[in-house]
Every structure is written in C-alpha cells, then in structure tokens.
Amino acid sequence: MLFFRLSFCMSGLLVIFNMIQWNFLETELRGYLASRVNNATNSKSIYELSEQKETTIKNAFEKGQHISIQSSSTHADLPGNLMKNNMNISKGSLQESLQESLQESSTKVATKASTEISKDTQCVQKRVSTANAQTLQTKEERRRRILYIHPGPPKTATSTIQKLLTEHQAQLQRDNIFYLGKTMPRENWNCNFPHMSWCITYQQYGERAEGKNVTCVHSMRDQLDAYYRMGADVIVSDEVIGAMFTVPEGTRSGKHDLYKRAKEGLKKLFSEVLRTNDWEIRIMIGYRPTKSIRPEGSRNCTLGRVREALPFHPWTRTSCKAVNHGSFPTNS
Amino acid sequence: MQGSQPWQFSDKLVEVFRPYADRVDVFDITTNADASRGDLSERFFCDLLEDAHEVCSFFRDNSRKEIRMNVAVSLEYDRIATAAAEQGLVNKTAIMRKDVNQQAHAFWKDYTSRTPGAKLPLVCPPQNRTTILYSESLQHEMFLFPNRKPNWETRQLFDTMMREQKLCSVDLERVLQTKEWKEFFRSMKPSTAEDV
C-alpha cells in the first residue's frame, strides 16, 4: 500500500516537474528566437536557421521524440542539441510558440535583408564605377572573371602581399582588379567585405553572433555578385582563411569538432557563395621552405604587437617551447 | 578562434583547396641563389595576376627596395628574459618583459663590442634530426614544385642554413650560469612608471 502511495506521489511530482520545466523551456525558446531577431542586423540568416529549427522540431514532434532546448541559446541551432531525448514537452504550446516567433522574425527579416542587399550592392557599384576601370567590356568578351583567393599559410609574406595590394589598389583597379581587404572590415574602402571563414562559420552554426555581423554571408554573396556583374576581378587575401579551413583532423574546441566544421564550412562557402556566379576561382598559396621556418618565424607567440604592452608577470615561455628545440640534446 | 592552433603548411592548403578551385598556384616567397626567380612583388603581380598590366609594369620598371612586413626578429633575448624571470633573477612586478628584452639586447651588444669573439652558447639539433628535416623539406618541396632540381637549390639553401646555425637556439641554462649575465640581471633598471 505504502509502495502504491509513494509511486502515486512520485508520479504527481514528476508531472509537476515536467510542467515547470516545459514552461521554462517555452520561455527560453521564445526569448531565444526574439533575441536572435533583435541582435541580428540581417534576419535572413535567422530566418533560415529558424526554418531549420522549425523543421527539426516538427519532425521530432511527428515522431513523438523528446526534445530539449538548451538554456544557453548559443548552440540551440544544432540539431544534435535540439534532439536530446531527455524530456516530454507539450506539442501544441511549442508549435504555437514557434509559429508566433517565426512570423515575427520573418517580417523583420524581409525588411532588413532588402536594405542590406541594396546597400552592399550600391557600395560595390560605386567603388567599381569610380575606379576608372578601363577594360570591363573587353574582359567580359575575352574571359571569365577571376576570383583570386590567397589563403596563406601564415609566415609566407602574407602581410607584405596584403600591404602591396593595399598600396597599389588604384593601379590594380584601373586594370579592373579589386582587392577586398583583409580580416574583419575596418575601413569603408572595401565596402566592409566580410571575413570569409569567420562569416561562414558563424552563419553555419549560428554561434558567437553577438558583436559579429551575422548578415555576412548575404553581404559577401551580394558584394561578389555585384563585382561579377560589373565585370571585375577580385582578390581576397587572408591567412586566417587557410588556417581555419585546414585544421588537422581531431582538432576540437570544447565539444566542437573543428575539423568537421572546417570541412563543412569550406564546402558551404564554395557551393553557396563563390559558385553562385561563374567565377574562375584561383587559389594562390605561398610557400616558404619548411627548413627556413625558425624560432624567429614564430615571434607572434611571444612578441605579439598587443602583448608587448603588457606587464611581465602574465607571460610565460611555454607557448614557444615547441620551436625552441628544447628537447634536442646539446650538440655544440 | 584558432589562434593557438598550429597552422598547416602549403601542401595541406593545396590538398584542401584544390577540389574546389579552377586553378591552384603555389608561389615561393624566397629569392633563389642566382636571383633568377625575381623578387616577390614582381612575381606576385606579373605571374599570378592576369591582366594586372599597370602594377606589373610598375614593379618591372622600378628597381625599388622590396617591402617587408613582419621581418623576422631574434627571439633569443626574449627567451633569456623569460628564463631569467622563471629563475627569479628578475623582479617581474617592477619591470616589464619588453624592457628586460631590450636591456638584455643592449647589454650583449655592448659586451661583444668589448669582448671580441664572445658568443652566446647554442643548443643545436643533432645531425640525425637535421637529416630527417632535410628529407621532409625536400619531399614537401618536390610535391609543390616537381620541376625543381633538388640537388641544386634545395640542398644549397639548406647547407647554407646549417652553416649559419639557423636551427640552433641559445642554451638558456648555460647563459644564465655565466657571471656576466648574472651581474646584468642584478643591475637591471626597473621600468618607468608610465611603462608599467
């Protein structure tokens, strides 16, 4: 008897606990979707993510699967996180919540996305048309537009090349070649062209969007499209592109498989951005003999420009041990 | 991000990007022994970019001094500084690392000018390691530049580097045991207030 009473009490408690937890999750979900809309400057990407989320969740419901929404919103777009089988939730209230949030986000998306696209395209058009480029028509007839990507690797004169490209922009532009700058946009001359690898990663995983421009994939696509339509060749040079897309197998950051991300990101970059026009894509890779990469070549690990200003005590030489041949026996 | 991750070398980039690209160009940033390769800026703008006529002419016509960014600097004084700090020879709260580095550099420059022939003791990789290094470098280079003559260019550059002890590093333990360096660290000036 006592056993039955206890079981009854436990079941009741479990139902109450589930209800409380579901209310919490529902609030989380609403808050999450709303924050994604509010934080973003272009909601188109959010719309895509939300569609993905909606499909994932709906499929899960149809199959009667259990769903969990993490309280931290940063990884909530990953199906793996959505699909943890750890609790039952109410089908009706979730669908209602989703529909409401999606409708709201879609409206905002449409408005913001159209503004962004127009601004990016206009900026590129202005840049190309004021560059005194001479060979648009001739090039158009003669050959495909070329998209040059210089992805490093580091320590192969990338800074020198980027400096030369920046310094000789005017000459390049008169020959209808446009350098798109390096790293995150710092100046307006390049129409704030987004960083290829960061952008695709943020868009793909919907992570670390705060403080970062999640509109970047659309911006990148629109800008490249505008250059293409205007008959220009373009150059992108950034060693971080190479570094991010070539992480060794097994590289992880916390629970994230960076190798898998790099592979997926690169594929996405080409299929969804770079191959949307008929660019001839040329990759330019620097080479410095392995044998000449010496400890001096790794000064960033100890003497980075920012770190130079720091006091002594936060410093260790641990990060540079690998290049110091510390394990070699004395030979001289 | 992945700032702390080791970066991959050129062959890996070729392997990763090749399936997606219409064309992959690998360019050697070094100038070869007989300078037949030309300077980097000319090669980049004239050989790699198509129709970059104006900028290419500029680099061909102007014998200008090549720009170099992030020129290699010796890390040896910084290594001496941090090793000294680890051994308690430096008051880390009173002096900044860059100041120790600079003062150590200045001290050694002054010392060698007064003591001809003085050299920092070095620790070098043993021959079996350098042999492996050379063979890996050669393999790497032949993959990227199959038309090169390995016995000419690659070997020559490697031998020069070995002669110049480019793969050696300062033997920190021996340095910090010498009386002149101990004396230097004792007499070091603290950083100024605005530096700290």
Image: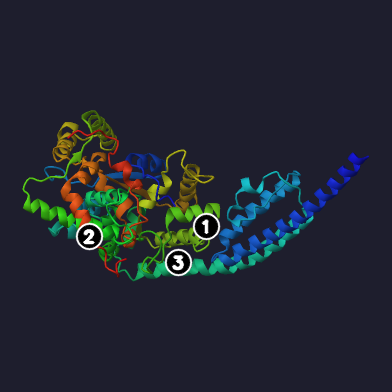
| Residue farthest right in this picture | A1
Residue A183, position in %: x, y?
Answer: 38, 59
Q: Is residue A15 left or right of residue B36?
A: right
In this picture the colour scheme is rainbow
The residue depicted at 40 percent of the width and 51 percent of the height is: B3
The three-letter code of the residue at mark 3 reads: Thr
Helix, strand or loop status at disc 1: loop
The three-letter code of the residue at mark 2 reads: Val
Is disc 3 in the same subunit as disc 1?
yes
Relative depth, front residue between B45 and A6: A6
Is disc 2 in the same subunit as disc 1?
no
Helix, strand or loop status at disc 2: helix
Does residue B68 appear in this view? no
Please give the residue where the numbered disc 3 appears in the rendered image.
A121
Is disc 3 in the same subunit as disc 2?
no
Please give the residue where the numbered disc 2 appears in the rendered image.
B55
**Which chain does tag 1 point to?**
A
Q: In which quarter of the image is the C terminus of chain B?
A: bottom left
Please give the residue where the numbered disc 1 appears in the rendered image.
A208
Q: Is residue B6 left or right of residue B186?
A: right
